[in-house]
Amino acid sequence: MDTLLAIDWGSSALRGALLDESGRVLDERAVARGLLTIEPGGFAAVFEAEFGDWMGDRASRCLMAGMVGSKQGWVEAPYCQCPAGLDEIADRLLPVVHAVDGRPRAIAIVPGVTCERGNVPDVMRGEEIKILGALDLLGSSDATIVLPGTHSKWASVQGGRITGFSTVMSGEFYALLRQHSILARTLPKDDGELDGAAFDRGVDTALETGSLMQSAFSVRTLSLFDRMPAAALPSYLSGLVIGEELRCRPLDGVRQLIVIGAPALAERFERALRRRGIGVRPFGQEAAWRGLWAIGRRAAERGAQP
């Protein structure tokens, strides 16, 4: 497999890496050119502006994942139904018709993944490459994985295939409470640094109370009676929200979780999980690059590469 340009193109950011034949990262770039900043029909121009030099001189192929394959993206890549692993995803790569000076670019988009919970569908785009990448890095085929964020994803993997997952809107609920509820008048303007003791108290309160709709009001009352400094309240609220997410998960008997995400948020989940006696194996952006490389490798093996 030749040098691969791996692209993780989300709603707010555009990230890329050059990967050699063994999956080693040769170079990386990141710019604030996510889907939300791009006008309809503008993806090709942004790609060339940010990565055209790499594609022309250093990489022979490109694989993209994330919101670039959504309805609002460059080209819509249909979802792959669970259970889905490297084989299923490699077989569903969607070629992108794009040329420069009459020379076609070898570009393909990785499909997102969907599953059914009861009669309700759930979806992910971009998280699937990180899940598969973390498994490849660990040399594992079975795991329980959480990808914390605005919309956290909890995934089960068996035999190297994503068998099911669920989405939890924890980050969005935090923002709503932080900015648009009565609590906004109590909380300081900025979150500031993590207050570990306040965060831990929030996690414990969430686990004990059993309802975020009830426990959230304690942010106001602790402030009202001067039982917690104002600067510590955002950390306490963060602990309440993350603690609620963990409380609702069937984690009894789970000894270790894979946590994939930005370091600051992953650290909070790791801290909260340890309070439930669960160990953590953390991964960052390296999981995305490994996942795209593994998909590209499998596509080449199966004759499905772009």
Image (spheres, rainbow, N blue to C red):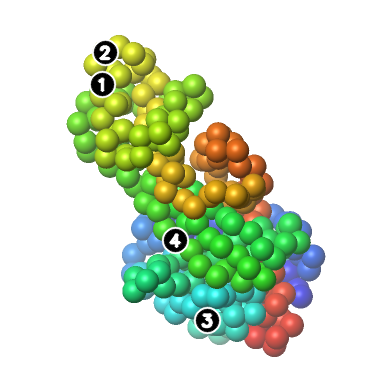
Mark seen at residue 94:
3
Q: Position of residue 292 (x, y in %)?
A: 64, 67
Residue appearing at x 74%, y 82% in the figure:
301
Q: How many marks?
A: 4
**Amino acid beneath label 2:** Phe
Residue placed most toward the observer, 25 or 122: 122
Q: Secondary structure at mark 2?
A: loop
Q: Secondary structure at mark 1?
A: helix
Residue that badge 4 annotates: 166
Cα separation, mark 2 vs mark 3, equals: 58 Å
Residue appearing at x 72%, y 74% in the figure:
297
Within 10 angstroms of label 1, few (less than 14), some, or many (20 or more) residues?
some
Precedes in sequence: disc 4 or disc 1: 4
Q: Which residue is at the far bottom?
A: 303
Mark seen at residue 221:
1
Q: Can residue 155 be seen in the rendering of this structure?
A: yes
Image quadrant occupied by the N terminus: bottom right
Q: Position of residue 171 (x, y in %)?
A: 39, 45
Q: Secondary structure at mark 4?
A: strand
Residue appearing at x 43%, y 36% in the figure:
207
